Amino acid sequence: SRFSIMGSNLGPLCKKIEYWGKDHKVENRGLVVTDQTTGQREKIESEQDIISFLHDEIMVNGVTENVIGVNFDLGQSDEAYDEVETELPFEYHGGYVGYLGYEVRHDTRDTICELETCGDTVNDKETIGCSNPLVPTAAFLFADRSFVYDHWRDEWYIVGVADATVESKEGVVQWMRSTSDQLTSMPYLEPRQETNMSKVPQKEDLNFNLKRSRNEYSADIERCHEEIKNGESYELCLTNQISTRVSFPNVSSEASLTSTPFGLYKILRKNNPAPFAAFMKFDSAISYNGGNANSINSAVSICCSSPERFLSVKKEGRIVDDNYAGNSKDHGWEFAPPFVSKDVGTNSKFIVESKPIKGTASRILLSKNDPNEMAKIEEDRRVAEELQKSVKNRAENLMIVDLLRNDLSRVCEPGSVHVPKLMGIESFATVHQMVSTIRGIVDQKYTPIDVIASCFPGGSMTGAPKLRSVDILDDLELGQSRGPYSGSLGYISLNGSMDMNIVIRTAVVTPSSLSDGEDSVLWDVAIGAGGAITALSESQDEFEEMLLKARAIRKSVEQWNSGEII
C-alpha cells in the first residue's frame, strides 16, 4: 500500500461509536457514543443500529470536498500562516474509521431483503453463541486529527478537520503547526538489528485450539456437499476459529511494548505484509473487571494483514488503471509516478470497486543465500500457474464475482456494473491469490453506507446465494459469532469516498479474564480461518487450506509470545 493512515481519539471533534448488536446479550445491546473530549458516554435509547447511525450522520452533515492547505514557511510570527489551494493524492480527508463485525449481517439483511423482495423466506436467527462482551459488534472513531504517510515519496501529511467556527479552524492550525515542528525535529532512528532482538525469558510453546475439531470440520464439509447437492447453495464459505492465550510478565521497560497487541501487529506486518493491513484498538474500559459479562465497555485490538478489498468508493478519474498500478511493484517503494488530478467537476459521479479473493495457494519461499534459488523461483511460478488454471478455484471465484455484480447492481446505475479484471493472480508474502475486480457507477441517490448495506457481509465470506448460504453456515458453525473476522474495516471519508477491506488473516486480541494485573499480563487471541466449499471440494484439502490461511498469523503470535521486538 502506498499510504498509511494513523490517528487517535485526541481531537476536540472526535467521538467514538460502539455498537453491541444481536450477537450480544439483550441487556447489553445498543449504541454507545463517547465524546472523547469530555469522556461522557451516552447510550442511544432507540432501535438504531450502526448502519442507520452512520447513514444518518452522513445525511445530516453532508459531504465536503473543501480542502485547505496550510503553509508555515513564511519566516513570520508563530501565528502567521498562508492558506493555499491544494489537492491531496489520497482519498482520506478525515471521517469515520473503524470496523463492522460479521454479525452486522443481522442489520443489513433487512436492507438486502427490501431490495430483493425476499417475502416470507427470510430466516434471520439471532446468534446463539454470544460474542465476547469486550468486542463490540462494530466500532468507529470520528477521526478529526490524523497523519497520512506516503511510502513512495517519504512524505507526511497532517490532516485536521474543523467545523464552521473560527475557533475550531484556529485550533486545527495550531495543532498542525506544533505537530509539524515535532515531526521535523524527531531524531533519525537506526533500524533494529535482528541479531540484537530482545527476548523475554524462554516460555513453553503455545497451545492453539480449534473451535471445531478436524473431524467436526470434515463433517461440516460433508454437510456442505449435501446442501449443494440439494440445490440450497452453490458455494458455502465455511470458517473455524483458532484460539490461544499469551502471557507476559508485567514489566515497565522497552520489553513492555512487545507485551501489547501492537507488538503483535508489528511482527505480523513484517511476516505477512498486505495492502489492506491495519491495527485498531478500542478500549472504553478504564479497568477491566474480569469476567463481567454485563459490562458494555470495549477492550479489543484488531491485528489485521488482509490482502482483500471489500469496497472502495471514489470520484470519477481517481481510479488507478490496473496495468499502471502493477508497475509500482516492479519499481519498488522508491518509484513515485506523478499524481495527475482530473477536473471532474462538482457533478461528477462516484465509482465503486470490489476485489474479491477466491483461490489460494502456498508460495515456495526462499531462504537467505538459498543455493536452490532459481529452482524455487521456477517452482513458485508453476504454483501460481496451477492456481490460475484450477477448475475448482475458477468456479469459486466466478460465483462470487456474479454475486458481487448482483449486490452492486442494487445501488449502481443500470448497465454500469462491469468486470475489468477476471481471475487475475496476485502474489503476497506467503500465498498466491486469485483476485477479480468489479466496478460500477454509484446511483446518485445512494451514500457509501447504502453501498455497504447492499453488499454486507462480503460475498467471499458467505457463498452464493448469500442469504440462504448465511443461514446454512450459521447452523454449521453452531450459531457462534465470527466477531470482527469476516467483517470489514476501513474508513468513510468526509469527501464521500470510502475504502473498506475484508477482515481476514487477522488476530483479534482481548485481555483475558484470568489476568491478575500485578505479576502477569494475559491476552486471549482469536484467529478466524476458512475456505469456500463447492461440489469439487475435498475434505482433506479444505482443512489444510484453512490451516494455511492461519499459518502466518499463528507464526506471528508464536514470535510475539517469545518476546521478539520489531
Image (cartoon, grey):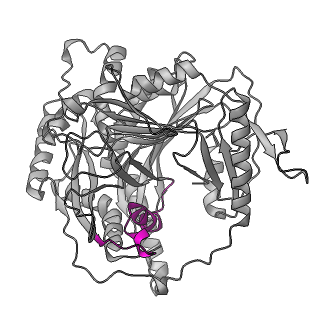
**Magenta stretch in the rendered image:** 248-276
Task: Report whether 63 appears left or right of 140.
Answer: right
Which residue is more in the foreground, 457 or 532? Answer: 457
Q: Which residue is drawn at the image coordinates 46% and 65% (left, top)? A: 266
Q: Is residue 165 above or below residue 309?
A: above
User: Looking at the picture, how far across and down is residue 294, in whole percent?
Assistant: 20, 39
Q: Report the front residue among 228 and 142.
A: 142
Q: Is residue 51 above or below residue 425?
A: above
Residue 350 within the segment the image draws in magenta: no
Place residue 313 in its image quadrant.
Answer: top right
Where residue 23 appears, as percent x and y from the top left, is: 23, 35
Tell me what residue is drawn at x 42 percent, y 51 percent: 281
Q: Nearer the viewer, residue 174 or 531?
A: 174
The N terminus lies in quadrant: bottom right
Considering only vertical position in the picture, is 121 above or below 326?
A: above
Horizontal relation, residue 214 to residue 48: left or right: left
Where residue 404 sits, quadrant-wise, is: top left
Q: Residue at x 22, y 28 (%)?
A: 468
The residue positioned 30% from the left and 48% from the top of the image is 392
Spot occupied by residue 44 in the image (x, y as percentages of width and height): 36, 24
Q: Is residue 270 magenta?
A: yes
Residue 415 shows in the view: no
* x and y, in percent, of residue 180 in the image: 72, 55
